[in-house]
Amino acid sequence: MQIPFVDLQAQYRALKTEMDTAVLRVMQQCNFILGKEVGDFERAFAAYVGAKHCVGVASGLDALKLALEALGIGPGDEVIVPAHTFIASALAVSAVGARPVLVEVEEDSFNLDPKRLDAALTPRTKAVMPVHLYGQPADLDPILDFARRHGLRVVEDASQAHGARYRGRRVGTFGDAGCFSFYPGKNLGAYGDAGGLVTDDDALAERVRFLRNYGQEVKYKHVVKGYNLRLDTLQAAVLSVKLPHLDNWNARRLAHAAAYTHALEGVGDLKLPRVIYGDHVFHLYVIRTARRNALQNHLTERGIATVIHYPVPIHLQAAYADLGYPRGTFPTTERLADEILSLPMYAELTPEQQDYVVAAVKDFFR
Ligand SMILES: *Cc1c(COP(=O)(O)O)cnc(C)c1O
């Protein structure tokens, strides 16, 4: 048996008729740039998360970048970012000319540790970027409280947590802006790169709308120096077909996670993911073991695809040597990088596939 890490083809097969119709309609209309489908998706996604505005952009990284820029963050400023995240969180801060200040994560939630925020604060700190990693909300209450006490902006990186809730409310709606990636493999994914930003702030939404479209207020009237970072109309049509299925897909992910946890509890030295804050949407099911590399090889030999999210922490990447954090600065993050392994996870995962994965993991520790 071959088990892919995600199965986008299974999802396409389930949506084929609806999807083909939506994509063909855009091609027939040829209204490719900021066509009607973009506004339709923006309204639907804003309503889904419970925000006043959604602005569709070219990628998750661009959503983060534009949020920071529209909030006035730039050279000389610092933004607090968790040390254990996808590098895009930090790259967005660098892209606006500010400095990412990395902060250690909690070992059991994998998310930004609110207890370490005070030590990271300087007179240059302008914002905090909680990341809802793997689909689990970060512990937002103490993070928002810290931001309020110090007059900081909050930009949520919700790129792995479409639909996740904290205290009953969807993530992305707690900060000044919530940023989403619609990269194909995300819980809500386009057929190429795409992203979106949600906010309740009218002025912020308007600034991002200008910035993503050459700084234009109306055609050829440029009020700020902008970019070409628009959400593609074809991708918006794809996303609108998928959005009504998101809650159902997330529920199936949650059920698969529960099944993995039930079957793998107490096996070898495995540490299984814990649901600590709010409603997890299991973008990834990440296990830990001291024998990670051997386990990954064992699964590869049995046709099971796994991924390490992420094998080298940001502070040890060549691209961020300039931040000057030596090895040992973030011991939890560094240990996680050596021990984590993401098992196959997607809504369409069948019980037979999951049983095969579980049996292979158990066999390794026997
Ligand atoms: C995917 C992802 C991004 C970036 O999204 P792109 O659409 O690939 O630019 C940012 N942050 C996190 C945590 C992600 O997982």
Image (spheres, rainbow, N blue to C red):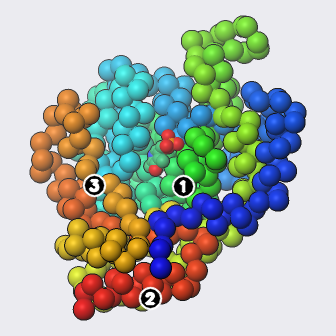
- Quick check: 330 left or right of 229? left
Q: Secondary structure at mark 3?
A: loop
Could you say which quadrant of the image residue 332 lies in?
Answer: bottom left
Q: Earlier in the sequence, mark 1 or mark 3?
A: 1
Q: Are marks 1 and 3 in contact (CB under 8 Å)?
A: no
Q: Residue at x 19, y 34 (%)?
A: 321
Could you say which quadrant of the image residue 226 lies in?
Answer: top right
Q: Which residue is mark 2?
A: 262
Alpha-carbon span between mark 1 and mark 2:
25 Å
Q: Residue at x 27, y 84 (%)?
A: 364
- Quick check: 7 left or right of 34? left
Q: Amino acid at mark 3?
A: Pro
Q: Are marks 3 and 2 in contact (CB under 8 Å)?
A: no
Q: Picture coordinates of residue 330 (x, y %)?
A: 19, 51
> For the image shown, how many numbered marks are present on the structure?
3
Q: Secondary structure at mark 1?
A: loop
In the image, residue 192 above or below residue 135: above
